[in-house]
Each structure stands twice: as structure tokens, then as C-alpha cells.
Image: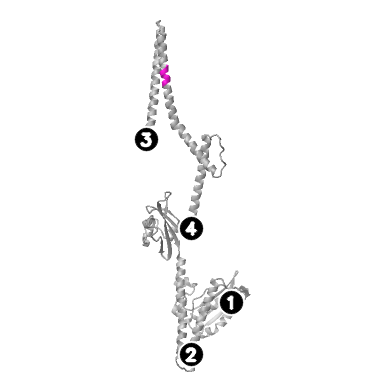
């Protein structure tokens, strides 16, 4: 760059010197003509040979200087005007030839070079196409990031946020003042930093689980590189795994509850059976022990039946047999089936059909199981002498069944878990009454 600047200065100085010399020769030549004219007017004798020599000398010097100035000007134009234009044309033609080789029509041999206007037009069009393509890709990426359910955060080598989507802000509760890697993840006390992620990727766990209030997040860290294959930053992908964690906890509770539910009756059966085998008892005692064994066996059988039913629904192996039936009659028959339990607890149970309910088309057996389940719970958890009301009605296109009682009810903090399988508010109380917590049925 410095050499080009010095060369430009030398050419400019030579050009100015040439102009000064030519101007001086012109002035000298004009002065000579004027002196000659004065001699002629004064009648003096003019030496034509000397005049001719002076004129030839002046014209020769002028022609030489003009030639030198022309050469310098040509060099200047060639180096700083024509040469860049030719390079521009060659570059444009090279780009055009590369595009043509990718599928466009090839240029024939011997075809004349395009003029500068056409080449610049082609370059402008291609540049617009490239910019449009880049803009389209950018908009597509932004749209994807905007609507992704997983959070995405990108950090540069300084740990500053260069990209973040709304899902990441929401999932990690990111505040406006959180602008760096440390600001976001330091509060979760993670044993990880950007240096470990970038330089110790093969030896460091890049996946972390964090808890944000009542939600669980899985964060995956990965470095990204630039065109030179050098580390250029870190990207964090945040996934909401709350549902998976809850399902895992439910599975653990399910295994523990079922194991306990099976262990209790098995222990009772084994104990009473061993007692009967160890000695002779009167018939009354034997009948009592056998009654306990039978009760516990039925309890186990009910639990196993519920588990098999649940398994069939989960695996879609349940064959649904729909039919038309009267919903009011079905509810009254369920009430009759529980008449003994109602009488034992001295409940007052009334069933009201509040509208002309048309026949319901559904699986009658499943609907009956649901009604029996709800009524059984209502009878169990209502104190002796309680009141239970059942309403059967029809609104628009929906038939409904409502059961009201003055029982102990369900605490407000447990209402959101009433459809959780095997969940019971008071496990000791429900175990005593024979509940399993299964309440998942399709109709």
C-alpha cells in the first residue's frame, strides 16, 4: 500500500514538471516570434538559418516532452484505471462461469467478452439473489427459534448472550439484567463453566439437571466453532422434563404402594393360616380366622383385577362394547347393589332424575364401574347417618351424574391429584377401608 502511494506521488511530480517545461518552452517560443516580428518591422536583417534552428530545437524538445508526458499518462491510466477495470471484468466473468458450470447455460468458446455494464448488471443481480437467500434463511431460523418449545441460548467467547429465544427466558426465569453465562447459571450452582465446556468437552459432563421453582429442566451444553474450526462460543439447549420427572416419581410411588397393598393381606393370610395349622380351635374361632383370610384374599383379588383392568386400558387391549341404555336406571341399580353398605352406615341416599334423559350410547359395564366407584367412596368416607344425593340430568347434548354427600371431603391441596392412579389422601385410612386408589376408566 505504501509503495503504491509513493509511486502515485512520483508520477504526479513528473507530470507537473513536464507541464512546467512545456509551458516554459511555449513562452520562450512566443517571445522569439515577437522579437522576430519587431526586427522585421524595424527593417533589420533576419538570419533565417538561425531562426530555423531555434524553431527546430524548440519543437524537438516540445515533442520529446509531450511524448514523455504521454507515456507517463498512459502508465498512470493503465495501472490505476484500466487494470482495475480489467480485473473487475475478469472476476465477474469468473463468478459467472462458475455459476454457469453449476447448471446454467455454458458460454461458447470465442464469444466476445461482456462489456462492463453487462458484467456489473449480472453481478448486481447475483448479489441481490444471494442477499435475498441469506435473508430468507435468517427469517426461517428466527421463526423456528421463536416457536420452539425448547429453550436456546448462544454465548460468545466472553460469555455474553448473542442469541436467546422466548422459551429459554420463560423456562429459566431469566431477568433483563441477566446478560452473561455466569448471570444465568451461577444461581443454580452448577459444577460447570464455559472453559470446561469448550476445552474439556470430552472429559466433562455437558448435561445438567436443574430445578426452577416446581419445574425440572435438562440443560445440554455444546461448543460451536467458526470457519477456521476454532471455538467461537457455547450453545445451551433447555428442555422441560417436569412431566418425565413426575411420571418417574409416580412410578416409584406406584411400585411402593402396590407392594405394600399386596404385602399387608399376604401377611394377614399367612399369619391366620399358620395359627390354624399350629393348634386345634373351636369352630367359632376357626370361622373368624377363615373369614379374615377370605376378606384379605378378596382384597388381593380386587387389587389384581384393578391392575389388570388398568393394564388393558394402557395397552389399548380393552374391547369396548357400546350399547344404548337408560342412565337413570343404571344409577338406581348401582344404588341397589350397595344397599347393604348403605344400611350398615345408616345413610340416607336419594336419586333424582332431573330431566328426560335420552338413551346413552356407551360401554355400559365401564359406566357402571365408574358409578359404583364414586358411590362406594361416598359411602365409605361419609360418617354414619350421613346424607347422599344423586342427580341424573341432561343439558344440551350431554348427560351427567352428580353425587353430593356431607362426608369428610378432600383437602384443597390434594384436589389436583384426584385423577392420579393409586394416589390416596390418607393412605392409612384408605388402606383400612380397602381402597386401592385406582380411578382411571374410559367410558
> Is the residue 376 above or below the residue 24 in the image?
below
| Magenta region, residue range | 59-64
Identify the secondary structure beneath mark 3. Answer: helix
From the top left corner, tell me how far across and down residue 197 is, in percent.
39, 57
Say whether disc 4 or disc 2 marks the residue closer to the N-terminus: 4
Alpha carbon separation for disc pair 4 and 1: 43 Å
Colouring method of the image: one colour
Few, some or many residues within 10 Å of mark 1 (<14, 14–19, 20+)? some
Left or right, 358 with reference to 98: right
Alpha carbon separation for disc pair 1 and 3: 96 Å
Alpha carbon separation for disc pair 4 and 3: 53 Å
Q: Quadrant of the N terminus?
A: top left
Dots 4, 2 in contact, CB < 8 A: no
Q: Nearer the viewer, mark 2 or mark 3?
A: 3
Alpha carbon separation for disc pair 2 and 3: 113 Å
Q: Nearer the viewer, mark 4 or mark 3?
A: 3
Q: Nearer the viewer, mark 1 or mark 3?
A: 3
Name the residue tied to disc 1: 365
Q: Residue furthest front?
A: 109
Say whether disc 4 or disc 1 marks the residue closer to the N-terminus: 4
Alpha carbon separation for disc pair 4 and 2: 65 Å
Name the residue tied to disc 2: 288
Name the residue tied to disc 3: 2
| Residue 374 visible at all | no
Q: Magenta segment, principal secondary structure?
A: helix
Q: Quadrant of residue 61?
A: top left
Name the residue tied to disc 4: 148
Left or right, 191 with reference to 323: left
| Residue 329 visible at all | yes
Residue under the point 45% across and 68% down: 246
Amino acid at each position: 500500500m505504501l509503495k503504491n502511494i509513493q509511486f502515485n506521488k512520483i508520477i504526479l511530480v513528473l507530470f507537473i514538471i513536464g507541464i512546467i517545461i512545456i509551458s516554459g518552452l511555449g513562452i520562450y517560443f512566443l517571445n522569439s516570434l515577437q522579437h522576430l516580428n519587431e526586427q522585421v518591422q524595424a527593417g533589420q536583417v533576419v538570419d533565417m538559418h538561425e531562426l530555423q534552428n531555434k524553431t527546430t530545437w524548440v519543437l524537438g524538445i516540445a515533442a520529446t516532452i509531450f511524448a514523455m508526458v504521454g507515456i507517463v499518462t498512459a502508465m498512470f491510466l493503465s495501472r490505476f484505471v484500466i487494470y482495475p477495470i480489467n480485473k473487475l471484468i475478469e472476476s465477474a466473468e469468473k463468478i459467472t462461469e462458475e455459476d454457469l458450470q453449476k447448471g446454467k447455460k455454458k458460454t461458447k468458446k470465442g464469444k466476445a467478452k461482456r462489456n462492463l455494464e453487462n458484467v456489473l448488471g449480472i453481478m448486481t443481480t447475483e448479489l441481490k439473489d444471494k442477499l435475498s437467500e441469506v435473508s430468507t434463511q435468517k427469517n426461517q431460523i428466527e421463526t423456528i427459534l421463536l416457536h420452539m418449545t425448547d429453550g436456546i441460548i448462544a454465548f460468545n467467547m466472553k460469555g455474553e448472550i448473542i442469541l436467546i429465544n422466548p422459551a429459554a427466558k420463560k423456562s429459566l426465569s431469566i431477568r433483563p439484567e441477566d446478560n452473561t453465562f455466569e448471570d444465568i447459571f451461577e444461581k443454580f450452582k452448577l459444577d460447570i463453566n464455559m472453559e470446561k465446556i469448550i476445552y474439556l468437552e470430552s472429559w466433562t459432563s455437558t448435561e445438567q439437571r436443574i430445578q426452577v421453582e416446581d419445574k425440572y429442566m435438562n440443560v445440554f451444553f455444546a461448543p460451536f466453532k467458526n470457519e477456521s474450526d476454532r471455538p467461537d462460543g457455547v450453545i445451551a439447549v433447555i428442555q422441560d422434563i417436569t412431566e418425565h420427572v413426575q411420571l418417574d416419581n409416580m412410578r416409584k410411588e406406584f411400585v411402593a404402594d402396590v407392594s405394600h397393598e399386596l404385602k399387608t393381606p399376604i401377611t394377614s393370610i399367612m399369619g391366620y393360616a399358620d395359627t390354624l395349622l399350629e393348634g386345634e380351635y373351636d369352630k367359632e374361632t376357626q370361622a373368624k380366622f377363615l373369614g379374615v383370610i377370605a376378606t384379605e384374599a378378596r382384597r388381593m383379588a380386587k387389587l389384581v383385577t384393578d391392575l389388570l383392568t388398568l393394564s388393558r386400558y394402557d395397552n389399548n387391549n380393552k374391547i369396548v362394547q357400546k350399547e344404548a341404555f337408560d342412565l337413570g336406571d343404571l344409577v338406581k341399580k348401582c344404588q341397589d347393589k350397595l344397599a347393604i353398605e348403605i344400611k350398615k352406615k345408616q345413610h340416607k341416599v336419594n336419586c333424582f332424575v332431573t330431566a328426560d334423559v335420552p338413551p346413552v350410547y356407551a360401554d355400559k359395564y365401564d359406566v357402571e364401574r365408574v358409578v359404583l366407584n364414586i358411590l362406594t367412596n361416598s359411602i365409605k368416607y361419609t360418617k354414619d347417618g350421613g346424607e347422599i344425593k344423586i342427580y341424573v340430568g341432561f343439558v344440551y347434548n350431554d348427560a351427567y351424574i352428580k353425587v353430593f354427600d356431607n362426608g369428610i371431603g378432600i383437602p384443597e391441596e390434594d384436589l389436583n391429584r384426584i385423577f392420579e392412579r393409586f394416589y390416596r389422601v390418607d393412605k392409612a385410612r384408605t388402606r383400612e377401608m380397602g381402597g386401592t386408589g385406582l380411578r382411571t376408566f374410559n367410558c
